[in-house]
Amino acid sequence: MSNLLEALAAELERPRELSPRVLNYIEGNYSVEHDAVGAFLTEELPKLEDYEIDLILSPVFTPKLADQAVFAELLGPDSVPRDEWPALVQQLAQRPTRAELMTLEGKAHPVRLREVTIERYVHRLRLEAKIPNAIFDLLERCTAMEDRPLLKAIARRTIWDDAGRRGILERFLMAAAADRGNCTLDDTLDLLNLMENRKPSDVENLLADIPRWQADLRNQVEVASGGKPFFNEDVRLMHGGARDQRPQADSRASAKENELVFLGRLKEMLA
């Protein structure tokens, strides 16, 4: 527990840059001039109610996959039960834990974190998740060492709590290991995105749905690459008639093409 506590403190106290969105929120809602945001953080922020602090700091202290990876590597296949979290939050608040909040000019402003912010961070790290031994062993054997923290964080995501969906991940890792001797981070991220967006229930359901998804994506790519049809002749003429002068590439076409390629590869791996 002491190692976990120190890791949490280190991550919470590392410098964090405030985004333009957060800065605009502070300036607009609290009538703060841009060059006075630093003073607001150190002098006025501690006086606010918990809900106000959470609204301001939630974009900064909501963990991303890279944050979860730090603790996925530390915990390995193990978990931290939810009933242990309040003690962690309380200890971190009492240390005290001080964040280093960076404004756009690069200046750090130390802010003592209240329990509401620490709790947000701790509760979203997936500390309660476990990695089944079979999946953990595959990750240890068949992934590049530098990729393992992120891959373990992927393996701890909520989508795999269901046994059928967890079976997709295990079969995917086994196929990757058998085919190439390793599993790549890019492919596993693509699988995570597919699972969280499309939510197939198990391997059989996934394989049954892939052809339909491929057909839909091919149609979308063709439309994006060929220009969208006009439904009014006057509008067509305004854009140059047969010489359609609109941009031909849909900004999403590349992502759709990449997903299409991945679906083909995934079908071969799991079939």
Image (cartoon, helix red, strand yellow):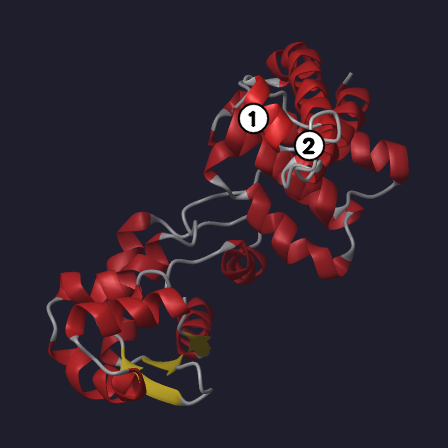
**Which amino acid lies under the numbered mark 1 shown in the image of this protein?**
Val
Q: For this rendering, which residue is in front, 129 or 234?
A: 234
| Residue 134 seen anywhere in this rendered image of the structure | no
The quadrant in which residue 25 appears is bottom left
117 with respect to 48 (left or right): right
Upstream in sequence: badge 1 or badge 2: 1
Residue located at (40% from left, 52% from top): 80
User: Distance between the Cα atoms at labels 1 and 2?
Assistant: 9 Å
User: Considering the image in quadrants, where does the C terminus appear?
Assistant: top right
Above/below status of 101 relative to 159: below
Q: Secondary structure at mark 2?
A: loop
The quadrant in which residue 263 appears is top right
Residue at the outermost right position: 180
**Tag 1–tag 2 contact (CB < 8 Å):** no
Residue that carries the numbered disc 1 in the rendered image: 235
Residue located at (10% from left, 68% from top): 49
Residue 136, position in %: x, y? 65, 44
Residue 75, position in %: x, y? 52, 57
Tell me the tag on residue 248: none
Residue that carries the numbered disc 2 in the rendered image: 240
Q: Residues within 10 Å of mark 1 (few under 14, many from 20)?
A: few
Above/below status of 88 relative to 237: below
93 with respect to 231 (left or right): left
Above/below status of 149 relative to 227: below
138 with respect to 20 (left or right): right
Q: For this rendering, which residue is in front, 234 or 153?
A: 234
Residue 46, position in %: x, y? 16, 79
